[in-house]
Image (cartoon, grey):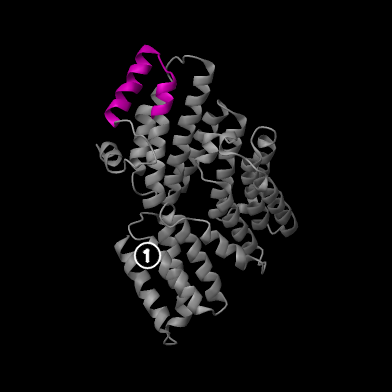
Amino acid sequence: MQRRRFLAVFSLPLATVIDPAEATARARTAARRGAVGRAEVVTVRSVIDTFAAADERLGGGVGRTAVAEYLAADATTYLRGRFTDDRTRAEMHAAVAELARLAGWTAHDTGRPGLAQRYYLYAERLAAESAPGHAAFIRRLRAHQAIDLGHGRACVDLAESAVAAGKGRVDPATLGQLHLAVARTRAAAGDGHEARVALREAERCIARPTADADRPWWALAMGVPEPLLATHTAKTLRELNDPAVTGHLQASVDRFDPVTHPRVRALNLIDLGGYHAERGNLEHACGAWSEALGLLDGVNSARARTAVTGIRSAASPYRSRGNTEIRRVDTAATRWLAAHR
């Protein structure tokens, strides 16, 4: 019932959504008769598009259980059927892998790292049945998750193995995203030289003209690479205390549309505000934080709650100094946290 309400509410123009009851019936019929073809692949990908669009706008806490239930009850049913040909089999494994990846992402976004890791591992195994490059692309997410959890030092090999597995198997822009994971893990390990080498390689790959038609759909599902380059470059340089980070932090905000990617833009704004606050530039810090809080209204995300808590921590040294803007932002952050428990 939750899945059906979710799909009914979030039937966005971004995706042509199959009716959930029809999707379920189609999966069970396909498993019983063994007739899994292109139409079934389209069904799964349509549902992924809808879930992903809602997650982008409202956070992983909205529809997380619906994603997991559709994955377990419907999508994996297709994998037990007989495929019309090998290409369809590969495409279905890729689609279900992406659904598992999305389930892992929503778990990560809602503060369930162990569950997210299990989904990512499952997604990587499914993707390997489709294309080695796809499996490498998901492996890079495991490295990024480890960085977010403070274990980046231990995941240099994981990120570099993703690059090795992707070379010659993915387009340049997608390979650039794999190099970004290496840059982040190298920076977390304190290896500034290798981190910068990986950043330059990522920038070189992403700068190469790559038409969307030449990129696999599962890579496009994670968004165009240029905004991701800005975000991960900023995070890498901040980890290295590189003064060049200022422009990249601003670029990481400017690259994301507040309508289509409010959560990502907001989280980058909070990082930007924290950077300005550390340097005593309170006017710019408060401006960034105020915009971020507005964008996060209604977003259900543990990462967002952690980031907003960070606003209060960063503002705390200035609260007693009578700064009106700091107090206003601190009050707004307190109210947001109370409303988004």
Near-viewer residue (145 or 85): 85
Secondary structure that dominates the magenta span: helix
- Residue 76, given in percent of the width and then of the height, sits at 41, 26
Task: Identify which residue is drawn at 44% across, 61% down.
Answer: 306
Q: Magenta part of the protein: which range?
A: 20-43
Apparent side of residue 307 relative to residue 275 in the rendered image (left or right): left
Q: Is residue 59 visible?
A: no
Q: Is residue 54 above or below residue 230?
A: above
Q: Is residue 70 above or below residue 159?
A: above
Q: Is residue 186 visible?
A: yes
- Residue 220, given in percent of the width and then of the height, sits at 52, 40
**Quadrant containing the N terminus in the rendered view:** top left
- Residue 59, given in percent of the width and then of the height, sits at 39, 51
Near-viewer residue (31 or 200): 200
Residue 26 falls within the magenta-colored stretch: yes
Q: Quadrant of residue 78?
A: top left
Apparent side of residue 222 relative to residue 68 in the rendered image (left or right): right
Q: Is residue 37 above or below residue 257?
A: above
Disc 1 residue type?
Gly
Apparent side of residue 337 relative to residue 313 in the rendered image (left or right): left
- Residue 156, given in percent of the width and then of the height, sits at 67, 48
Task: Identify which residue is drawn at 59% across, 43% down.
Answer: 140
Task: Identify which residue is drawn at 40% across, 23% down.
Answer: 40
Near-viewer residue (127 or 119): 127
